[in-house]
Amino acid sequence: MKTQPEWLASLAGLLDVGQIDTEPEHLQAHAMDGRVPRAIVFPGDFAQVAAVLQWAQSEKLAILPRGSGSQVALGGIPRRADLVLSTIRLQRISEYDAANFTLTAEAGMTFAAVAALAAGNLQTLPLQYPFSPATLGGLIATNAANPKRLLYGGVRDLLLGLRVALPSGAVVHFGGKVVKNVAGYDMAKLFVGSLGTLGVIVEATFKLSALPERDETVLAVFPTWPQAAATGTQVLAAPLLPSQVLLLNAAATQAIMPQGEGDDGKDVQGIRSMAGGVMLLVNVEGMEEAVERQRRDIAQICRKQGAATVDVAAGELQSLLRQRLMALSRAGELADVGEGSRGGAISVRLGTLTSRVPAIMEAIAHMLEPITPPLLIGDCGVGQVRLILRGGGLASRGEDKALVQALRDLPHLVAAEGGHVVIEAAPTAVKEQLDVWGPPPSALNLLKALKAKFDPAGILNPGRFIGGL
Amino acid sequence: MIECKELIARLRDIVGPEDVLTSRADCATYGYDASVFQGEDVIAVVFPQSMAEVAHVVRLARAAHMPFLARGTGTGISGGAIPTQGGLVIELAKMNRILEIDLANRRAVVEPGVINQDLKEWLADQGYGHTYVPDPGSQVVSTIGGNVANNAGGMHCLKYGVTTNHVVGLEVVLPDGEVVTVGGMVLDQPGCDLTGLFVGSEGTLGIITKIIVRIVRLPEIVTTQLALFPSVDDAANAVSAIMTAGILPAALELLDRACIDVLEQTIHIGYPEHAGAALIIELDGLKDGMQRSIDRVADICKRHAVIEIRTATTPEEAARLWLSRRAAYGALARLAPTCYIVDGCVPRTKLPEALAQTVEIGKRYGLHVANIAHAGDGNLHPSIPFDINDPEECQRVMACGRDILKMCADMGGTITGEHGVGVEKQNEMPFVFSPADLEVMHWVKEVFDPEDLCNPGKIFPSSTRPRFLA
């Protein structure tokens, strides 16, 4: 094993001095689960990414790829962390073919930048809220949840092509720019959700959509949970085309209300609140006539089920709500929603059948209320539940045996339907006591064999993925 | 090493004697699919009726070091289901049960041998108001297993996606005989998307024994318009303008003058003489706003020199408007004993140029080319009538197809939009992939099938060429 000055010297042969950061403060800030890297590198093009990977493979140094770091908490504790490989200098637009509704951009480009670019042509990449700070590479590697998946699909459905740098030093390209493409294996799918463990994504091609004429959110607040849950089911059974149907428990409803809300029944910026109220949030978008009709139908369904209030949010108010929803889902950024400390926050993503979302939310609440009150957001159209346990209040979450056991037990709730639980963010002390990915899948041996081909020396995110890969 | 006789005896033990065919005539029948190629002699054709039987057969083939491949109803036209290295054909047509429908969660679970159209009809018969969307041209005959293996397309791909956007889970018998499940009823299983990897892998990574698909609610309203244009350019430009206006049609099908001529000769379609292109536009969705969309489409067509627009107001009228498209292949078949259909894809805006090029390339080879295109997604099907009994003409047709695909690749498209690589286009893979790309793709094959027994000789470039139909 070379000494640090030695390997830094050989690394300097691949990159400019300005592309290697060894500032102790910066290294600390880029630590992952307590593992502090020895350098952060900023390759400027695809060849440099590949060169760094190839070099790291020969030196047997562990690489932790990183975009904007918005989902960096996802994954198990790294076995080693030598270099953080940042993609933030890979921000070029390779090709924006507006006429054909495709965008090819480098992996370090943020989603917000893509959204702004597309909006200029009345287009959108309907994968995240437009202000998402995540990078394109990060969205793919983490298979980030799409708030509008119900209407537009997930990362896998909008991704047309991919370029990846491999530890072998190769930069390879899969897929293309056309929607119909069956030339060879759909290799891009392999990288969706792979958490940087098979290669570093350097460029991606996505399919864009036209910006809808209207985009509105119906917010209905119910006095009781069963009413809200039943309404969600009814909305999905109706002949409508919502882009999102969310069920929020009372705690989550409270958390996303704009700051400064008053007492029961007082209006704040057009959304009325209610103590202990449970919110159903339905997004509809498209042509003006269709949105109006859906808004009416949904409001009617909500009132019939006993909604205390039904409001509609569009424009700035809708954007504010979405920012709060996004902040809520990212356990590390909950300072905006009224909680002081960031430490100790836990964010869990559960997958289940769409019909079971309300029941699963109830079961989680039942399990966790005695320990610590959960915030729950259920995506009823897609079959996903987000569980958030806010930071602060506990000196060290890891010492809470009851909490850790409850987190370990979560997979049982969704096992029967083949669901899954991923703890997307948690303090290291909690990660040490359980597997954030839950029980390993039936295809684990295949994942291991694929890993052995793509990353034979195991330098990419070692220990952070499923099965400790 | 297992002897042939013993192998057959063991196969009979696994699936029952009536489900093993060994006569030369029977085996030869399963050496063809709908492509212009034929396979080599196989030892036997077996008809398993369960996952366990499939796994057992695969393990046996492996022990005998014998190549094997899965087959649905043999409708593929790239040679993906023909046994180019002999061995065993595992025919899945008897695994044709619809196992489960979960309407609340919009899922259907089917065995691979279920015919695509049968699932649609069954759902319609139950009055569920839901359907399975992917509609490849072969849907009346092709199996869902085959559709999944090829990532089949169809006419509704731009708006609704291709097969992979509708498959959420699979049960697969791997080439070593182990069984694995990927995905499931629930979306977004953590980890790499192995379900997505299997879809479109053309039976080379394992044999699919169960498929979980999404079913979706039927649209509230479906409208159909037929627009006749002076030229393909006008029609294609109208398509682009429709898209840029923010309208997303469910289907956009284009026929060129050569097709219209044949349709006039055969079924007297009665389009105006100066119509250079026919465009069928289908819009669907909620009824609110639909009339405005229809009007906007008509306006856009008028701004692109449209000769005539017909709008259907009843299902019967819609069927009449669709007639030219539905009858096109049949009409072309009357021109010559065989019709070679190329399956290129280009970015949509390049379609007019690509279509014109196919005709030019055809002329270079002394061949007549008629074009049917999925205008919304840039997937073109140049169709070349020829005599398969003329070896020289066969070579010209293949060379013509190859040049067309090179043209598509160079325009930023791909060499196959929906028919698959099979044996037909394996040596055109370098048009779109570098040697490094192909090497890494081959790693996947090596992981799943290190012994190269599962539908070997497909997809990747090869020096051995398959035989043409005799």
Image (cartoon, rainbow, N blue to C red):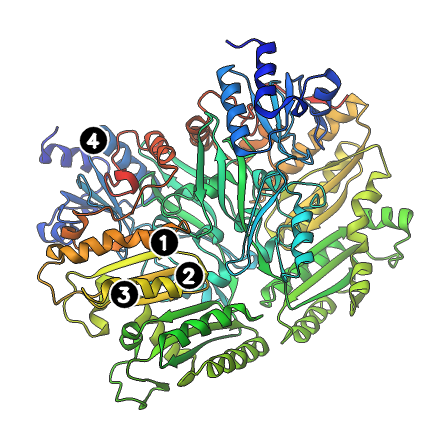
Q: Which residue is mark 1?
A: A414
Total marks placed: 4
Q: Residue A366 has which mark?
A: 3
Q: Which residue is mark 2?
A: A356
Mark 3 or mark 2, earlier in chain:
2
Mark 4 or mark 1, earlier in chain:
4
Query: How far across and how far down the image is residue B56, in percent?
Result: 51, 25
* Residue B117 in sight in this render: yes
Query: How far across and how far down the image is residue B17, in percent?
Result: 65, 21
Extreme bottom residue here? A266
Secondary structure beneath label 1: helix
Query: Is label 2 or label 4 in front?
Result: 2
Q: Amino acid at mark 1?
A: Val
Q: Quadrant of residue B24?
A: top right
Q: Amino acid at mark 3?
A: His
Circles 1, 2 touching at the beta carbon (< 8 Å): yes
Cα distance between the residues tagged 1 and 2: 9 Å
The residue carrying pointer 1 sits among few (fewer than 14), some (14 to 19) or many (20 or more) residues within 10 Å by Cα, namely some
Q: Is residue B121 left or right of residue A291?
A: right
Q: Amino acid at mark 2?
A: Arg
Secondary structure beneath label 3: helix
Mark 1 or mark 2, earlier in chain:
2
Q: Are marks 4 and 1 on the same chain?
A: yes
Query: Is label 4 or label 3 in front?
Result: 3
Q: Residue A60 has which mark?
A: 4
Mark 2 or mark 4, earlier in chain:
4
Cα distance between the residues tagged 4 and 1: 39 Å
Cα distance between the residues tagged 3 and 1: 15 Å
Q: Are marks 4 and 3 on the same chain?
A: yes
